[in-house]
Amino acid sequence: MELNQQNEPKHPRSEARPFPWRCRHCGKDQVRLAVVSYEAEVRHDGRLYQFKIPKLEAPVCAACKKMVVTEGVDDQINAALRAHLQLLTPAEIEAVLARVGLTQKDAAERIGVAEATLSRWLNESQIQTRALDNLLRAFFAFPQVRAALNGKGQDPRLGTSDTGAATT
């Protein structure tokens, strides 16, 4: 069976082409890269957040003023959301993992998420929830938390009785 080239992953067509682009809204060849102020509305973790991005680099039509949302634009919006919510960045998570001497796999097991989930946080394809960000912060900040959350060997009574309390 031959592989059809259409099944292969592609970069977004719009991001690979040189400017100007044809506008999807008005049909004019006047879409160019611009730096704009953008009022974002993003749903994350069950809530709607509104925040301003003062310098968003995005393709915009000079004729109708419509913005074209590309993967690059989406990445900028996600980074701005993470900053707005003051969540740990992938670089901060990686730096602390190195500082405390844990691999992605070990850290994921100990905090109770799939390794693939932690990987998505680190490669910026997913933003962690506030609750998991708080767990990461406590896990990274306190050796006692790292000692108590030890993955498969963890005391199943931890937090439910005095016998399950960490002793370190």
Image (tube, rainbow, N blue to C red):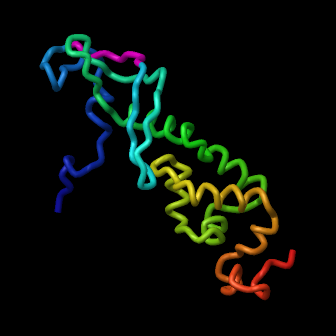
Which image quarter is the C terminus in?
Answer: bottom right
Judge whether residue 51 is colored magenta: no
| Residue drawn where x is 53% and y is 52% of the image | 121
Residue 30's image quarter?
Answer: top left
The residue stretch that appears in magenta:
30-36
Residue 76 at x, y = what percent? 46, 33
Judge whether residue 34 is colored magenta: yes
Residue 143 at x, y = what percent? 81, 64
14 relative to 91, above or below: above
Residue 7 at x, y = what percent? 22, 51
Q: Main secondary structure of the magenta part?
A: strand
* 54 left or right, relative to 33: right
Residue 89 at x, y = what percent? 60, 44
| Residue drawn where x is 33% and y is 33% of the image | 70
Residue 61's image quarter?
Answer: top left
* 32 left or right, relative to 72: left
Count of marks overlaid on the render: 0
| Residue drawn where x is 56% and y is 54% of the image | 130
| Residue drawn where x is 69% and y is 86% of the image | 157
160 relative to 46, above or below: below
Residue 147's image quarter?
Answer: bottom right
Which image quarter is the N terminus in?
Answer: bottom left
* 71 left or right, relative to 111: left
